[in-house]
Every structure is written in structure tokens, then in C-alpha cells.
Image (tube, grey):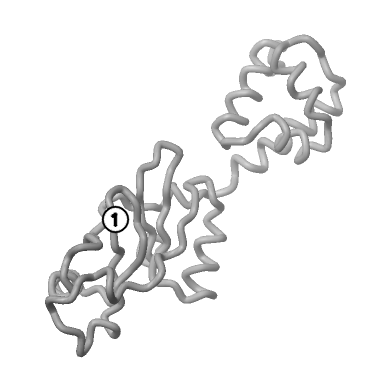
Amino acid sequence: MFLDLDTLVEEIRARRKDLGWSQKRLADNAEVSQSLIAKLERKENVPNYEAVKKIYEVLEEEKEIEFAGDYANDDIISVDIDDTVGEAVELMLKNDFSQIPVKDGDEYVGMVVSRDAVGTKRDKKVKEVMKHSFPILPAKSPKSVVIELLKEKKYRAVMIKDEEKNWKIITPADLL
């Protein structure tokens, strides 16, 4: 089945935007000029068959990539930066966690690790004992990057922030 030019252009534009790609990124990946992509999307130029084929193939390849956001869980159990170590320990024990994310307002800024809480006064503030945050990735990051961080770098979780600034988390269990 052949697509008319309008349908083809709309499909290319929609796929590019779904991937969060700029015209430049698509052009670089398809090895065509950015101006060709811009003119194509404005329907000012009908590129040759080979150029359209390259563009379409690049978009098809990317469609098959699994993204981090597809595996992320929005049910994040965390503590606030001003909570006490005692509250953090309670949550970790209740949920069988060895680490827990720390939130400051709308941002995740660190983590509390159970071994660092051992011997620490329970009324001490989380911000005094927290470590750096779990890695933070955009939702469009490839799943393979998450796997590398969890497996090779030995993180217990990866934080995901989508285009709308919503937070999610991925743990090894989410990838099973």
C-alpha cells in the first residue's frame, strides 16, 4: 500500500515528535540535511525516494527500541529532606528497602542508605545523612541504559523524569 505525500509527511512528523527528536537529530540519524526535513514537513519539497527511505528506516528502527519510561513505576515511596532518620528507617523496614529516595519539594535530591542510618541518632534530619541521588534519566532513554546502571553500576534504582516533569522509578524487579 502506498501512502500519499500528506499522510507520509504527517506520519514522519508524528513519529519524530513521539521520539522527542528535533529535525536536526532526525536529519543526522538519516544522514540527510536538516533543511530537507524542514522542507518535507512544510511540504515545500518532495525529496527523492532514497532520502525518504532513509528517514523512514531510521524512524522504524527507533520504534523498536524499548524506552525506560515504558518500565517505570509512578508509585514512589520516598522521604522528605526534612524528615528524620527514624522516619526513613521505619519506611525502609516497612517496605523491605535498603535505600530510599529523598525528595525536596518536587525534586529528588538524594537517597538514604540503611547502612548509613545504622548508629545514627533517629532524630537527625535526613538531609544530614543522605547520599547523592539515584541516577536520573529522561523517559525516552533506552531500556539498555537502565539495565547497565542497575546491573553493571550496581544501583538499586533509577529515577525517571518524563517530559511533563512527572517522576517515576525503575528497580530491577520492574524489568523482570
Up-down: is 119 above or below 19? below
Given residues 141 and 50, the one toward you in this image is: 141
Q: Position of residue 82 (x, y in %)?
A: 20, 63
Instruction: Please state which amino acid type lies under the numbered disc 1.
Output: Asp
> Would residue 8 be found to the left or right of residue 158 on screen?
right
Q: Quadrant of the C terminus?
A: bottom left
| Left or right position of 6 against 112 | right
Identified at 62% across, 22% down, the residue is 11
x 29%, y 55%: residue: 104
Q: Residue at x 58, y 25 (%)?
A: 14
Q: Where in the figure is residue 101, as x and y percent of width and height?
A: 30, 64
Q: In the rendered image, which residue does mark 1 sit on?
A: 104
1 vs 15: above or below: above
The crowd level at tag 1 (other Cα within 10 Å; few <14, some 14-19, many 20+) is few
Look at 51% across and 68% down and name the residue there.
Answer: 149
Q: Is residue 159 left or right of residue 125?
A: right
Of 107 and 64, nearer the camera is 107
Instruction: Please identify the quarter of the rendering in which residue 83 is found.
Output: bottom left
Q: Position of residue 1 (x, y in %)?
A: 69, 18
Q: Nearer the viewer, residue 124 or 88?
A: 124
Query: Which of the pair 141/130 is nearer the observer?
Result: 130
Q: Secondary structure at mark 1?
A: strand
Residue that sits furthest to the bottom in the current view: 119
Q: How many dots with numbers?
A: 1
Q: Tell me where residue 50 sits by quadrant.
A: top right
Q: Does residue 90 sit above or below 30 in this rendering?
A: below
In the visual, does 73 lie left or right of 17? left
Residue 5: image location, x then y, percent: 72, 12
